[in-house]
Image (spheres, rainbow, N blue to C red):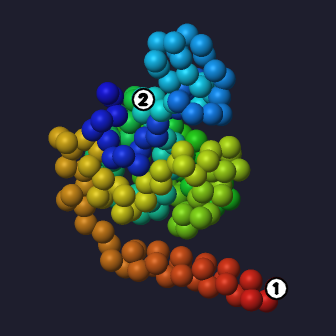
Amino acid sequence: MPFSHLPKNFTAPANSEGFCYSNQLPGILDIRRLIAGEPAFGQSCVIDGDLRPKTLVLADHLLRHYSPNDLNEVLKVLVDLADLGFQFYSIRVNDAVAFKPDLEMSCAHPAIHDITPTTPAEIYAKMAALGHSGSDVTILDSLSLHNAPFKPNYELLNHLKFNPQLLTQSINYLNNQHLVCISEQIER
């Protein structure tokens, strides 16, 4: 199975429509199955199939501050995932923009440089506007990029060192955005 080495939240079952049988109503009686002693009441159902890739949303706004070597480690993983059929979006101020990762990307590439600090709720809303349900989306933020074992032989980003000041600025930005949203709702 091509996705067995990935974290479970990167894939979803590839469900398909089928016809399931049981020994109880409701359903359409199949006489041949009844005579054979098999479950004979059939009805349409969803059958779990193989795994399929989810849409991955790059939301780590600190990526633009990575060294070229550190960014290259991330891009190697993203390129491998793209080769497996994963689709990528990056989160910008007003929308989510599709992109295809490649090893030539730098921190100045808009898919990396223009990532905006955003809450998961805002990300899911942006993706829903593009027709992607929340259950088909996985957010790649700072935490998930540093803790996800994408492949057993990758020591993904274990050596990265963050700038604590940037992290504090990011947290303050998100807290301020949250307070603005709360104060707007209180005023209503």
Residue 85 is at least partly visible in this image:
no
Q: Residues within 10 Å of mark 2 (few under 14, many from 20)?
A: some
Residue 37 location in percent, x, y?
Answer: 46, 18
Quadrant of the image occupied by residue 17: top right
Secondary structure beneath label 1: loop
Which residue is under mark 2?
50
Residue 174 location in percent, x, y?
Answer: 53, 76
Residue 145 is at least partly visible in this image:
yes
Quadrant of the image occupied by residue 98: top right
Q: Nearer the viewer, residue 50 or 147?
A: 50
Give the mark nearer the N terminus: 2 vs 1: 2
Residue sitting farthest toward the top: 32
In the picture provided, is 16 more to the left or to the right than 37? right
Q: Amino acid at mark 1?
A: Arg
Residue 34 location in percent, x, y?
Answer: 53, 17
Residue appearing at x 60%, y 24% in the figure = 42
Residue appearing at x 26%, y 49% in the figure = 149
Residue 5 shows which numbered tag?
Answer: none
Residue appearing at x 46%, y 40% in the figure = 12
Residue appearing at x 48%, y 46% in the figure = 56
